[in-house]
């Protein structure tokens, strides 16, 4: 399974700096074994997609509406993202769930819309620190998966990203044992939910303070099929170093 290293630029980047970052990533992508993806703000998707045309770096969005069109001021639909050049879309990120009150049902509807538009959804799940301390991390993530993933998610090539909420942007990460355990639990649920083969092929990314210094250890864990990178994706050298670590990791399955 080819690792996927996805950069979530979040609400960072005006046109000049976004294009410079995209071109720097593309310039260093040669020979990288992992698949590379950058997800700029919606205002930059078309420009970044044009700049990256013909390179090994794909482009994605950070969210989409569940409807194809309609009276939804300020929203962007999945077909609009595809039309702008996106191939992927991040859905259900903890910041969207917390700041916009997104529910599992809404994330599921968005994932269905993404698949219908030909996009690959990257659905995020993860527990809070209080939930982990209470021993509820795996049940919380299991409920999010059950509520957020459409029935044909695995068959259509969807991606799951496990991001413990308390690790995002904090510099803290779970232990390697905890990461492996959670990814194993996610894999088991995906396999049960799809009858086996399709669930075994879903890429499960780890996200939450991934950086060059810890990438190799994280990416070498069983069932870790790549990374969803936040802050480090805003520095081309750091993002590429993480991608290089993914390519150097031993086979996980």
Image (cartoon, rainbow, N blue to C red):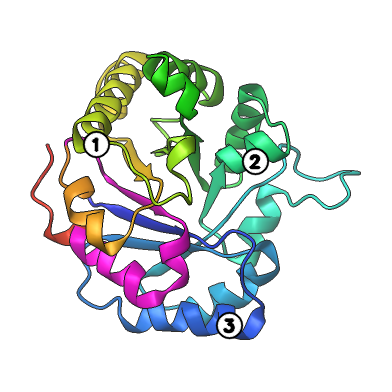
Q: Characterize the local packing of mark 2: few (<14), some (14-19) or many (20 or more) Cα atoms within 10 angstroms.
A: some
Sequence-earlier tag: 1 or 2: 2
* Mark 2: secondary structure: helix
Magenta segment includes 238:
yes
State the CA–CA distance, disc 1 to disc 3: 34 Å
The answer to whether 103 appears left or right of 138 in the picture is right
The answer to whether 215 appears left or right of 23 in the picture is left
* Mark 1: secondary structure: loop
Q: Which residues are magenta?
A: 222-245
Spot occupied by residue 160 in the image (x, y as percentages of width and height): 41, 36
State the CA–CA distance, disc 1 to disc 2: 25 Å
Name which residue lies at 67% across and 62% down: 42
The answer to whether 224 appears left or right of 37 in the picture is left
Spot occupied by residue 167 in the image (x, y as percentages of width and height): 43, 42
Name which residue lies at 47% across and 57% down: 230
Which residue is under mark 1? 175
Tag shown at residue 17: 3
Name which residue lies at 46% across and 31% down: 126
Sequence-earlier tag: 1 or 3: 3
Q: Characterize the local packing of mark 3: few (<14), some (14-19) or many (20 or more) Cα atoms within 10 angstroms.
A: few
Q: Which residue is nearer to you in this view: 71 or 128?
A: 128
Sequence-earlier tag: 2 or 3: 3
Which residue is under mark 2? 96
Spot occupied by residue 65 in the image (x, y as percentages of width and height): 72, 42
- Badge 1 vs badge 3, beta-carbon distance below 8 Å: no
Question: Dividing the image into 4 quarters, which one contains the C terminus?
Answer: top left
* Mark 3: secondary structure: helix
One can see residue 141 in this view = no
**Foreground label between 1 and 3:** 1
């Amino acid at each position: 399974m080819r690792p996927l290293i996805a950069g979530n630029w979040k609400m960072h980047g005006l046109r000049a700096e976004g294009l410079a970052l995209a071109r720097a990533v593309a310039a260093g992508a040669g020979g990288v074994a992992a698949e590379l993806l950058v997800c700029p703000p919606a205002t930059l998707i078309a420009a970044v997609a044009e700049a990256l045309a013909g390179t090994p770096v794909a482009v994605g969005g950070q969210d989409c509406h569940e409807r194809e069109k309609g009276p939804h001021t300020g929203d962007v639909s999945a077909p609009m993202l595809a039309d702008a050049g996106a191939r992927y879309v991040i859905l259900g990120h903890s910041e969207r769930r917390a700041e916009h009150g997104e529910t599992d049902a809404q994330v599921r509807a968005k994932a269905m819309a993404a698949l219908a538009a030909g996009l690959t959804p990257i659905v995020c799940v993860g527990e809070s620190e209080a939930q982990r301390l209470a021993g509820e991390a795996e049940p919380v993530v299991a409920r999010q998966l059950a509520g957020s993933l459409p029935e044909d998610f695995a068959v259509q090539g969807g991606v799951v990203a496990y991001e413990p909420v308390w690790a995002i942007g904090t510099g803290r990460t779970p232990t390697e044992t905890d990461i492996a355990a959670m990814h194993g639990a996610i894999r088991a649920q995906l396999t049960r939910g799809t009858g086996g083969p399709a669930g075994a092929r879903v890429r499960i990314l780890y996200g939450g303070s991934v950086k060059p210094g810890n990438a190799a250890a994280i990416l070498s864990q069983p069932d870790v099929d790549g990374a969803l990178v936040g802050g480090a994706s805003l520095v081309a050298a750091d993002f590429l170093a993480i991608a290089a670590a993914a390519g150097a990791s031993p086979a996980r399955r």
